[in-house]
Image (cartoon, grey):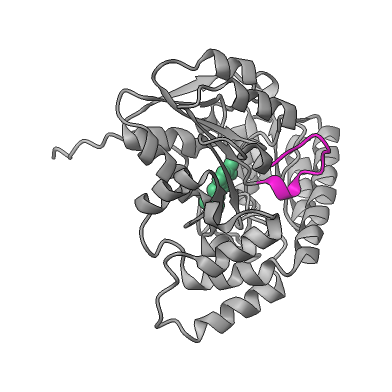
Amino acid sequence: MAKPRSYIPEIGKSVVKNVAVPDGRPVINLSLNESSFGVSPLAAEAAKHRCERLYRYPDPTSTDLRAVIGKRFGLDPDRIVCGNGSEELLDLIGRLYARPGDEILFAEHAFLAFSIVAMRVGATPVRAPAPGFTTDVDALLERVTDNTRVVFLDNPNNPCGTYISADEVKRLRDGLPENVVLVIDSAYAEYVDRPDYTDGLELVAGAENVIVTRTFSKAYGLAALRIGWGYCSASMAGVVNRMRAIGNVNAVAQAAVAGVLEDEDFVRGVRDATNRERKKLTDAFTAMGLAVTPSVTNFLIARFPDTGNHRAGAAYAHLVQNGIIVREVTDYGLDDYLRFTIGRPEENDAVIEALSRFMV
Ligand SMILES: Cc1ncc(COP(=O)(O)O)c(C=O)c1O
């Protein structure tokens, strides 16, 4: 029977759920780049407290939330916009600034949501080469045309875990025409411990066309609540606020963020544990003969041989059989790779154990 035609082709891999493990062990899901290190007790307490008043709507302007974010990051709350995850903000920017015939530009292997946003609005996704899996600012700038409306930069990049320096981000900002919106998506900023990194917040000053997006889904451990935020000019904040749904950030999320922002020790602990475990996985995979792309985030990609019995698809199936779900990245054009979210120590030990049995 004929079906209505969707303008959005199938894109992105569906997440494997309910994998049955024969001996009843819990499934280890390292496919989504969530934090593996739990939730701050202060955030959980604040969320529970708000649950006593679930019959009340959330504050539609997220006023207290923007105030605590502003205080923590030293920013003007009037220029902070909040979203149902930072993904909502990426989507809103696409809807606000691009239409069919326009171009949305980003690096090859950039976050899949960027091309999805382009297709939702009927704009053309344009990909700039990213040698060494790292965003190339010159390649982006060379591809700017009169039709470019939005440039998305995920820094660090998902799925590769690489980053570009503050100088390079500034060069990108300065090289773009003022009518092109630059989105600096810093979803993994908390994990980066490199002196030449910036989350981009200082690059918003004096620019009408720049928005930085951040999230509480990763190191802050609040993925289930869907809460992200952006920082931009007052005029851009105004249009984003007109485009978004009125109650886009739920009340429990608003309360939990206030809790976790009082618990910076928790976030530091998550970052340190993640970075320690990332090194452990990197060393173990390298010793097995896999090529690991150096990552500054809570995930990494590893390259498998392109012939023989040790190919990425077979490794993925072997891990699933052992109750471990990682991310195939064929939809990112990375057929020989798998992406591993960094788990807790015992989860990573299980990955290393299962994979070393596979690689013999
Ligand atoms: C680069 C990047 N940006 C944004 C997001 C969206 O995060 P959220 O919508 O949970 O804030 C993700 C999620 O994986 C991501 O990898």
In the image, residue 190 sits, relative to residue 267, either above or below, namely: above
Q: Is residue 41 visible?
A: yes
Residue placed farthest to the bottom in the image?
52
Is 308 in front, or is 237?
Answer: 237
Q: Residue 335: x, y in percent?
A: 57, 27
Tell me which corner region of the image, top left, top right, bottom left or bottom right, holds residue 193. Answer: top right
Quarter of the figure with residue 108: top right
Above or below: residue 290 compared with residue 68? above
Q: Which residues are magenta?
A: 188-199
Whether residue 221 is visible: no
Q: Nearer the viewer, residue 308 or 179?
A: 179
Residue at the spot 56% in from the left edge and 35% down from the top edge: 207
- Position in image of residue 241 (x %, y %): 41, 53
Which quadrant holds the N terminus? Answer: top left
Image vertical order of residue 233 relative to residue 345, above or below: above
Name the residue: 56% across, 69% down: 64
